[in-house]
Amino acid sequence: MLSVPYSTVLNDVMLFGGNGLSGEGFVQLIKDQYEQLSKEADDHVRVMGIGLHPFIINQPFRQKYLDLALDFIAEQDDVWITTSDDIAAHFKNNVADRPAA
């Protein structure tokens, strides 16, 4: 059994529903999270999971902010845009059988 963590940090339910975050705030949060994780990338493998739910993020007044955030992430050279299934497959095929350090 393999579990890929589900983040509540960058989760639209918590951000928009629980914290009342603005669209601009969402874009800035995505950028800030990426920039910090990118700085740490030489020393640690990190996952920047973004939890999105159609009934929250797909509201018309939020669409442009999602587009801006995703465009920013897609422009980065050191990002692997993927799914939890692909992360699990990569781990299983490349890491799971290695001896513990």
Image: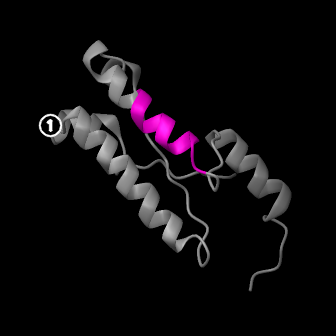
Which one is in front, 91 or 30? 30
Category of crowding for the residue at label 1, using alpha-carbon neighbours closer than 10 angstroms: few (below 14), some (14–19), many (at least 20): few
Which one is in front, 88 or 33? 33
- Secondary structure character of the magenta stretch overall: helix
Instruction: Where is residue 49? Give x, y as percent.
Output: 49, 47
- Locate residue 83 relative to residue 27 in the image: left or right: right
Task: Please tell me whether mark 1 sits on a helix, a strand or a loop.
Answer: loop
> Which corner quadrant of the image does residue 44 belong to?
bottom right
Q: Residue at x 42, y 66 (%)?
A: 36
Instruction: Where is residue 35? Give x, y as percent.
Output: 44, 61
Residue extending furthest toward the top: 60
Asked whether the viewer can see residue 8, the reply is: no
Q: Which residue is mark 1?
A: 20
Asked whether the viewer can see residue 76, the reply is: yes
Residue extending furthest toward the bottom: 101
Q: Residue at x 30, y 13 (%)?
A: 60
- Locate residue 67 relative to residue 43 in the image: left or right: left
State the count of labels.
Answer: 1
Residue interval drawn in magenta: 67-76
Instruction: Where is residue 69? Give x, y as percent.
Output: 41, 38
- Locate residue 80 relative to residue 65 in the image: left or right: right
Q: Indicate whether 61 appears above or below 20.
A: above
Instruction: Where is residue 97? Give x, y as percent.
Output: 85, 67
- Amino acid, disc 1: Gly
